Image (cartoon, rainbow, N blue to C red):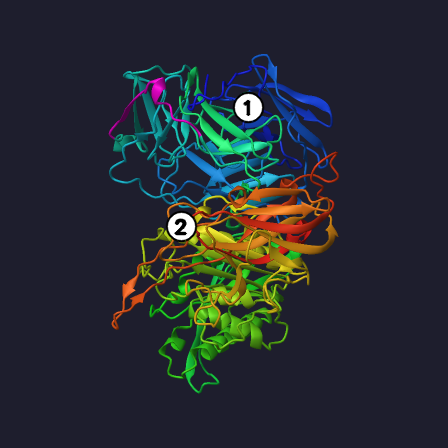
Amino acid sequence: MSDTRGKTELVDDPGVVSPVGLEPAWRCGKAVAITGHIPFARIDIERDGVVWVSNVRTEPSGARALIELPERLGAGQRLRARQRFGDAVSAWSAAQVVRDSREDYPAGLPQPRISPGPVYRCGAMSGVENILTGSEMVISANGNVVGRQPYADSPTATRISPQYEIGQEVIAWATLCDEQVMSRDYFPEPPPATLPQIEFYPVHEGARTVSMRNILPGARVRLSRNGVALPERPHPGPGWGFGLAEPVTRGETLSATQRLCAGDGSSEPGLTTVLPCSTLPGAGAWPPQRGDTSVRLHTFVPGGRVQVYADGVKIGDGSGPVVQLTRAVRGGETLRVVQKVGDCTSSQILPLDVHCVSPPFAESPAALDLFPVGEMDYDNGDILLTTGFNHRVAGVIRYPGQWDGVDAPFHERLGALVGRAPLAVFVHGRWGHPESYLGYRYIQEQLARMGIVSVSVDCNAADNLRSGDDMLDRSELIFAAIRHMLALDRGEVAGHEALKGKIDFSRTCLFGHSRGGEAVLLAAETVNLPRVKIAGVISLAPVDTSRTSGSPRGFAFMTLLPAADGDVVNNEGAKFYDRAEPSPFKSQVYIHSANHNFFNRTWWRDEGLVSVMDRESHEAILSAYCCAFFRAVQLGHDTLGFLDGRLRPLGVQTTNCHLSFRMARQVVVDDHEAGDGIEVNTLGQPARRLDGDNPGEYSFMQGFEGRYNDSFYHFTRGMVISDKKKVTWRTALGRARSLDGKEIWIRAADVYEKRKRRGSLARFELGLEDSAGNVRWVSSDGVGGLPLPFPLPVYLRADGRLFDKNKTMLKTLRFPAACFGTVRPRRGFDLASVRAILIRVDQPDGRAIAFDDLEIVSPRGAQ
């Protein structure tokens, strides 16, 4: 076959099949999970160098297979897997060393959950998630076992017999070794009066898997082919697929109905017709980065087969969502992705350019689910604040509970085995809603599930501004809330003993939104409470009334800035980031198509200046990046990769998120702050243009003398290159340095200018020059690229002048040094002896690009 552009002949070598992915395995587990195999492949499992399980046949779904083992696993055993398809045998997978769950989950196994929900009367199947692979899983109803899987993984589905009934208490249990954990309680509810009609996803000839949606959890589904009914099957809902004994053919008609209780009847049938091979779409995938050994798909046909080619040679043959490759991809090459269903091959072939940097996707940091959520409200009446006014001290607390619910005991194993839990304090802004402090409950619950206590402070009393200093009022309400938490920890609040001796105040983090975003900085600078140390501060869309120093230091700092903010239009938090001292790091997330309000669930109005993402997308972004921050700072988890751009969280519109990040103790080559002219960099070494007059060094601040223009909202200085001719800028390092294992980071932006042509992305190249004068270049497009300035409406003011709020915002681009070359090659560029860094801009339209914070970074420092 040829690709769609007819340039490359793709030869399907049947002897080449992908290695499979082998997921983490656990002591006492009776199964392992593999992914990326060809449908109907056979799987071998090797244990400590000896083939242990052989020729286990997989199902047609192809996405994931659970392989039963002859005996339970022991910690430290070394496992590998491979697939057989036809006469082909893949290479072995990367090894997995069997882990003891107590090392990764010292407070006990993750809490299972029945999902999708709800649980319906007459339900005959339930899905269960959040269990470790190989665990035994049981579902009970009023203490009686109604479903059992002797070995399972996440997600799994279990038949229920007898069916669920109203009034039952349903619980899912997971057991591994001698540990057992239960889910929260679920209570069956009546089915809807009218069952929804099932909808089919497109089905193409040759398919052995039929996928449907709109199925109620636990419903029995009857699928018919050409009017002939197949055996009825229970379904966990809402969108799982069915495997077929024989492939479908073009023009066949399929229909499906669902029912729960027999006496209530079935739904109206959903209908579809099998489509011809010519309509089979191509697979969609994210671009890989240099050195990757897999390709991640975002669009693929369940039960299909996906092949990957490089220069016409097959290097991958498996299934979605991740196709393992037979070798690492090389920088600059183009891959081609082909999708098949049975004997049908899509005519759409996806070309994928391999980038220097294309961060892999990983599970969102907000997804860690270990504990039930305990709830506790407080209302301590009024206190007299320094400003002379009485204010109510109240809020809502969430914490890791022994079970879900109000005043539940603190989670027993967490307290006994891990110790005290850190504290997070949430502070809302001024909006007028009496329950603004309840708007972050979704994040509070996520934190509780991962082992963090949180309190959201009712600051509505501070909104009346009677004192003239609502920042001081808010900071005092923060301190009052922390004092209440201290009292709870000391056991001094009658009837609320759950948190006695349970809170570690030395790892306290503060989160503020809007006016709360500045108040938490003021509180962090002025806190003087026994046992309390501020470890980190998050400012979401903060104001800047100059009540703080404006220079966060002494704690980790993150700001999140909605580009379409119709309230804090100037994104004041950018100034806080620029002036912050990385202690040990600072982080900025600039969010295109986000408004001010949708991060708080009680703030209903969309005040965005342009069309924005839906509320769910706002919340997913806030959850992912905030939980990455909290976990890194408070729990010591390795989640900083989500903040510095090495990882992307699944389920998040990351294309709208533009990151800046800086660690302490890195080599700053040039931050343009010294004020001694552009010809000398921060290292004290010469910097100059090689092919003309030097570019300018400017303030990136509105209203400041020497500013480039008023589209910047920063508090920093930098260099702007704007020339219709090619510009090459060279900054010396002073001595030859080995950049082996290092990265070059630079903050850059496509500058907004009214009269410059737009429509294409601005780009530049970063170069390294070795001691022999050899230069290697990498394009900004190969490390994520520069977004266009975010467009906002231009207003006509009352005085007749235009009010232009279009924004230029810097972001950090990462250039791994390995993308430029190798250490001591036989000829050419030498990465062990780099003497200068170069920037090359060639924009024929003269579009300006801004640069700041050029650094040499050790990846170990970014862990």
Q: Which residue is mark 1?
A: 311
Residue 277 painted magenta: yes
Q: Which residue is mark 2?
A: 617
**In the image, is residue 388 above or below residue 277?**
below
Quadrant position of residue 822: top right
**In the image, is residue 232 above or below residue 763?**
above
In percent of width and height, residue 686 lies at 66, 59
Span colored in magenta: 268-283
Residue at 36% x, 78% y is 464
Amino acid type shown at disc 2: Ser
Residue 638 painted magenta: no
Pick the front one: 725 or 276: 725
Measure the C-alpha gap from mark 2 to mark 1.
38 Å
Front label number (2 vs 1): 1
Quadrant position of residue 178: top right
Residue placed furthest toward the front: 692
